[in-house]
Image: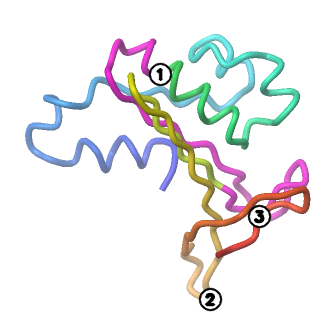
């Protein structure tokens, strides 16, 4: 689950306007910088798919929408490794007034083409499914 699908899942419930303010799909580095105030240095030092970027995106979304809590998702899509990161590597970050968290998930394609996600450890070699 990533990008617009997260917003869809959160709002596919009656009364969701009571808790969902909005969302931003910021695909490019420029959009992440302009819309969510992700630091240029963060993007170039760690890449778009990183714990650091995911946390800055969540903080930026919380500021942008003036909310108490915000989530961000950043994922390495496609069929091949990109920037040395495994396909399906996903970071989900939460930013709240009193707490911040970020988890790494790795997606593994099944024979039917769907993805199964699990927590992974991320090191210099990329993600390891756990």
Segment tinted magenta in the rendering: 61-89
- Residue 25's place in the image compared with 75, above or below, is above
Q: Position of residue 112 (x, y in %)?
A: 56, 85
Most foreground residue, 84 or 79 = 84
Residue 86 circle label: none
Marks 1 and 3 sit apart, C-alpha to C-alpha, by 26 Å
Q: Residue at x 68, y 41 (%)?
A: 51
Residue positioned most to the bottom: 111
Q: Position of residue 80 (x, y in %)?
A: 83, 63
Residue 10 drawn at (x, y percent)? 28, 45
Q: Quadrant of the C terminus?
A: bottom right
What number is the disc on residue 61?
1
Residue annotated with mark 3 = 127
* Earlier sequence position, callout 3 versus callout 2: 2
Q: Residues within 10 Å of mark 3 (few under 14, many from 20)?
A: many
Instruction: Name which residue lies at 83% across and 58% down.
Output: 123
Along the viewing direction, whichever of 57 and 97 lies nearer the viewer:
97
Side (left or right) of 16 relative to 63: left
């Amino acid at each position: 689950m990533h990008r617009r699908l997260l917003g869809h899942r959160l709002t596919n419930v009656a009364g969701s306007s009571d808790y969902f303010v909005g969302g931003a799909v910021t695909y490019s580095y420029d959009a992440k910088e302009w819309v969510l105030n992700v630091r240029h240095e963060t993007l170039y030092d760690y890449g778009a798919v990183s714990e650091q970027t995911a946390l800055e995106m969540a903080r930026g979304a919380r500021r942008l929408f003036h909310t108490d809590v915000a989530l961000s998702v950043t994922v390495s899509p496609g069929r091949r490794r990109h920037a040395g990161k495994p396909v399906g590597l996903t970071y989900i970050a939460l930013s709240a007034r009193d707490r911040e968290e970020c988890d790494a998930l790795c997606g593994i394609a099944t024979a039917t083409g769907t993805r199964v996600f699990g927590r992974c450890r991320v090191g210099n070699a990329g993600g390891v499914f756990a």
